[in-house]
Amino acid sequence: MRLYDTARRQVVAFTPGEVVTIYTCGITPYDSAHIGHAAVYVTYDVLQRRLRDLGHRTLCVRNITDVDDDILRKARELEVHYLDLAAGEITRFQADMDALGLLAAYSEPRATSAIPDILGFICMVLDTGHAYRAGGAVYFDVSSFPRFGQLSHLERDEMVDLAAQRGGRPDDPFKDDPLDFVLWQPSAPGEPAWESLWGPGRPGWHIECSALAMRELGTTIDLHGGGTDLIFPHHECESAQSEAATGSPFVRHWMHVGMVALGGEKMSKSLGNLVFVHELLDKGHDPSAIRLALLAQSYRHPWEWEDSILELAEARLDRWRVAGSGDAGLQGVRDSLDDDLDTPRAIDVIDEEVAAGRGAAQAASLLGVGV
């Protein structure tokens, strides 16, 4: 199998051992899962299916960020407890993913379950000289880690701009450097707070994933992923603090999924240009067709959602089901998935077999599509 590696910026061999450890950044449960989220999780689901088909055992951890700025802000707006908001959205997310046929995650840990792990991790970063205390918070010192930027390959000005857009607060007056990022912060009035050596507060966003990934999967992970919007600052910061703390590589292979747009803009909760999975299901759309619509796109390139994509997927699914069972095209689908998870080509292979009157249910099953 060959997959594109974000850090190396090329398609390279992916040759894990018998057990493959995978960490994918999960939801912040303050709103429903949209098609962009679904595209990410379906991608890693197909990857796992092919790895298992090859004889591997996959351990996929998908975290739940149930305490951060976004969920606390939304809970205040709705005047509900942040954990009550999280509970409802987690239930809906799970129902959506089950409908789309996702394999069960090895673990779905919540950030609030890891506070002791996070506190210990911050102590490790401080003890190795890569963090400092200021203004009641603890910050990672990027100047102490020369490899900062090894994942995103961005220029400093680009990093500062993205940090400002994505909650990094480069103008924080307590920082030594605008790119330094928070590991622990004082809680604002009304926010949840935990006791720590540095005073009551709550964790920063990036430290949650490092602590959870290492707790669940160990010091070095075979493959880490998420949407491309997480490359910087989230995954860059996650990688830096993890390697600073342990002195070991954090991730062997970085795999990111391209963004989905609607109306010319990336789907985002802030813009409100969203197509929710549960709404498509409520309208009676076949979940296998939704999954097939997502897999018809190249996983690592951005693309635009249009209703016609789902219509084409529904027609395609009907043709596949009429063709019935059979193992036609199975090797062609395997070869396509081994070539940087080329799901559009895999779908073409099945289309060709079905057009010739041959059933390809086993090949479709490798894509997680039931026919």
Image (cartoon, rainbow, N blue to C red):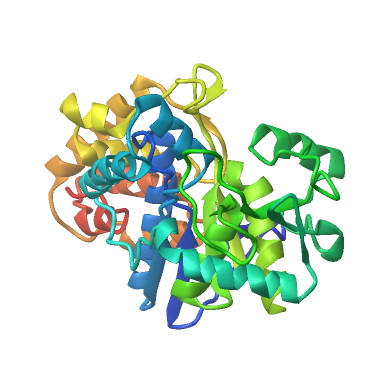
**View extreme (bottom): residue:** 18
The quarter of the picture where residue 109 lies is bottom left
Picture coordinates of residue 188, whole percent (x, y): 56, 40
Q: In this view, does 38 lie to the left or right of 88?
A: right
Instruction: Name the residue rendered at 53%, 56% in the picture.
Output: 225
Q: Which of 149 and 42 is in front in this view?
A: 149
Instruction: Name the residue rendered at 24%, 45% in the picture.
Output: 91
Picture coordinates of residue 329, whole percent (x, y): 31, 57
Q: Which of 205 and 294 is in front in this view?
A: 205
Q: Is residue 281 left or right of residue 25?
A: left
Is residue 65 visible in the rendered image? The answer is yes
The quarter of the picture where residue 274 lies is top left
Is residue 146 visible in the rendered image? The answer is no
Instruction: Name the residue rendered at 57%, 64% in the picture.
Output: 196
Number of disc labels: 0
**View extreme (top): residue:** 263
Q: In this view, does 138 lie above or below 171?
A: below
Q: In this view, does 367 lie above or below 114?
A: above
Picture coordinates of residue 172, whole percent (x, y): 76, 40
The quarter of the picture where residue 95 lies is top left
Picture coordinates of residue 198, whole percent (x, y): 65, 62
Q: Is residue 42 left or right of residue 265?
A: left
Q: Nearer the viewer, residue 183 or 158?
A: 183
